[in-house]
Image: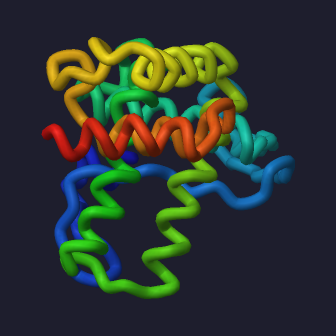
């Protein structure tokens, strides 16, 4: 985060510039210790201290900071479920559209990224239980109420499709019937 915000290091390994990022997560329950040596002014000696890092908690903290930064321009603003509902559907939809419009290569790597976005969305739903009812409510209203399908209420059908992908409450047939009808109208 420091390299991105303070040092202005915004070039990826492939040499392309980027404006935002999300942290990666390796190892769900791994913990490790690291030792730091500091000079103690009172004793005039070097003092060692050992700290434990819990990777899962650290990942969640950085992820929430990234979402706050992406949504509101600051990592110091409070994290809300709305941050997830704003970013994840757009992230998934944009990735799919980039592949379909040949802005990204159609490859195993692109497919892996897509499924990693879906996995991340599921992970966020698991750690924020209040997300699932919100997502299910949006999809349910879209299916059952024609007024909810209006562009003013559901501005992005792609975002709604991403929400329907992670919910699992509705059958593919029920959702796709009304989704395709609305898509043809638009």
Rendering coords of residue 96 (x, y %): 34, 63
Is residue 154 toward the left or the right of residue 35 in the image? left
At horizontal 42% and vertical 43% (from top left) the residue drawn is 161
Q: Nearer the viewer, residue 127 or 98?
A: 98
Work out whether residue 126 can be spotted: yes
Rendering coords of residue 133 (x, y %): 61, 15
Rendering coords of residue 114 (x, y %): 48, 64
Work out whether residue 121 can be spotted: no
Q: Please state, as top left, top right, bottom left or bottom right, where the C terminus lies in the image.
A: top left
Q: Is residue 97 above or below residue 51?
A: below
Q: Nearer the viewer, residue 138 or 14?
A: 138
At horizontal 34% and vertical 30% (from top left) the residue drawn is 86
At horizontal 71% and vertical 35% (from top left) the residue drawn is 57
Rendering coords of residue 130 (x, y %): 62, 14
User: How many numbered discs, if any?
Assistant: 0
Q: Nearer the viewer, residue 149 or 60?
A: 149
């Amino acid at each position: 985060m420091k390299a991105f915000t303070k040092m202005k290091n915004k070039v990826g390994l492939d040499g392309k510039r980027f404006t935002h990022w999300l942290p990666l997560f390796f190892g769900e329950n791994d913990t490790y210790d690291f030792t730091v040596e500091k000079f103690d002014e009172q004793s005039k000696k070097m003092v060692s201290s050992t700290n434990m890092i819990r990777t899962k908690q650290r990942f969640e903290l950085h992820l929430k900071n990234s979402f706050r930064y992406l949504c509101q321009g600051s990592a110091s603003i409070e994290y809300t479920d709305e941050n997830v509902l704003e970013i994840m559907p757009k992230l998934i939809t944009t990735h799919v559209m980039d592949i379909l419009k040949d802005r990204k290569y159609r490859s195993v790597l692109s497919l892996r990224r897509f499924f990693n976005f879906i996995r991340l969305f599921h992970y966020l739903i698991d750690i924020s239980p209040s997300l699932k009812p919100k997502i299910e409510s949006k999809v349910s209203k879209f299916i059952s109420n024609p007024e909810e399908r209006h562009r003013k209420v559901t501005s992005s059908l792609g975002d709604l499709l991403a929400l329907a992908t992670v919910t699992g409450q509705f059958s593919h047939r029920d959702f796709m019937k009304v989704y395709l009808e609305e898509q043809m109208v638009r």
